[in-house]
Image (cartoon, helix red, strand yellow):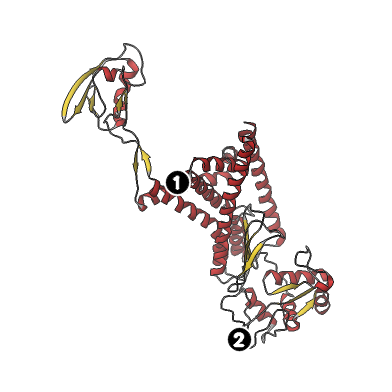
Amino acid sequence: MSSVLSVLSAVFWGVLILSVLVFVHEGGHYLASRAFHVRATEFFLGLPCRWKLSRKSTKVGTEFGVTPLLLGGYTRICGMEGATDELLAPALELVMNRGRVEAEEVARVLEVDVDRAYGLLATLCDWASIRPYYNPELGETPSQKTYPAAFETLERDANLLTEYDRGHDFSLPGSTRAGEPHPTGMGADEFLAQERSHTYLGAGFVKRVVMLAAGPLVNIALAFLIVTFAFMVRGVDYIPNVTTLGGVVEGTPAAEAGLAEGDTVVSVGGTDVSTWDGMVAALEPYLESGEDFTLVFTRDGVEHEVSIDLPEGKALDGIGFRSQPYQTYYPSFAEAAGATLDYTGQVASYVAQLIQPAKTMEILDQSSSIVGISAMAAEAASTGLYTLMMFAAAISMSLGFMNLLPIPPFDGGKILIEVIQLVIRRPLSARVQMGLSYVGLAFMIFVFVVVLKNDIFRFVIG
């Protein structure tokens, strides 16, 4: 029974921590997209699923909700697929002028095959410029895996803004409902460019990079804040580096010489000492040789000198006194942030070694999969809130830096593609991007298999 409870506890805490952190990560992408007026149709806690609990925002049109698959989260930012076709403009114009049109009709008017027509309409749906129309008379439902036969306009105001655009006002004269014709009054290419400007694809290079980097950076920022405020609230335990004794063990050379708790050592064998580390270094030669020595200490402001009698020719670990007990120091925000910054640098350096061939296996041997993370999360939770929060911060920071690695399909890999396209001044072909994604995916599978194997031996087999 206890083993079952342990497994359930590990699953609960592992899913909880990873779901929250991935949700926060996706929240970074979402907030950045909205800041740049890029349309985002969905933002969910949990992985995509046909069953969901959600509510649609009347202000920005985004559907917010939760799904039963609580291992992560996702956001749908319009135009992330990056599909382009010279017939997008006439296809969009056709839908806007007719209000609702079947894919086969689009194919006939544009003189293309039906598959290409569906591709054009799917891209425009991804841009949130139009939407699928599910005809109940044909038995079509939004839960079906394929697109329906027809597509229709979205509700638009007189300024051609949709529910996903900031500042829309459907009460204005000239606004139309979904499925109604809405001639744009401008050229097809001009209107397409306007619609494209509301998508990821239509944002500038800097904005696209910020949207990609926002997810990992939010994870890192969250971890930074958790660790910094944990240092400030919990404080940092330390042993005072002073020569004042914290206690003396009975029957030891120190006790026989008359030393007691509270005495402050000032010299060892004629060597002045002012720190605990210095005193330990001064004692070391005598402890190794067993040679007697003199020790000077102060008690109540009075200096005393005693002889420490050691067993002749016998090495010792110590003479029987203890250091001061742990004390707690509460750093200021600047001090705590500085310590957290050092920690952040260590995590970044550690993660960066993952893509250094000479270090890859060494890093993987020290890494954990979801199995190890779940087990450690449960253990951290049983220890207390402070330990759990510090563990969550460590995972959040690692997740952030992992996603910044220049490996598709990580966010860092997508940023790398954006940089390459900026340098060569043209988009990489879908075939090249897919090839890079396959290489990155192969690396991710390799990493997953190695760390999962390690966790099985570490936490399951033992």
Considering only order in the chain, which callout, 2 or 1, is on the residue closer to the N terminus?
A: 2
Residue 447 appears left or right of 258? right
Q: If the image is split into quadrants, where does the N terminus sit?
A: top right
Residue at far front of view: 1
Q: Which of the 4 quarters of the picture holds residue 6? A: top right
- Measured as percent of width and height from the top left, residue 281 is found at 31, 27
Dot 1: element: helix
Q: If the image is split into quadrants, where does the C terminus sit?
A: top right
Residue at far bottom of view: 173
Residue 388 appears left or right of 184? left
Label 1: few (<14), some (14–19) or many (≥20) C-alpha neighbours in 10 Å: some
Q: Amino acid at mark 1?
A: Tyr
- Measured as percent of width and height from the top left, residue 406 is found at 59, 53
| Vertical side of 369 occupied by 124: above or below | below
- Measured as percent of width and height from the top left, residue 374 is found at 59, 43
- Measured as percent of width and height from the top left, residue 221 is found at 48, 55
Which residue is tagged 1? 343
Which residue is tagged 2? 172
Q: Amino acid at mark 2?
A: Leu
Residue 283 visible in the shown view: yes
Q: Which of the 4 quarters of the picture holds residue 302? A: top left
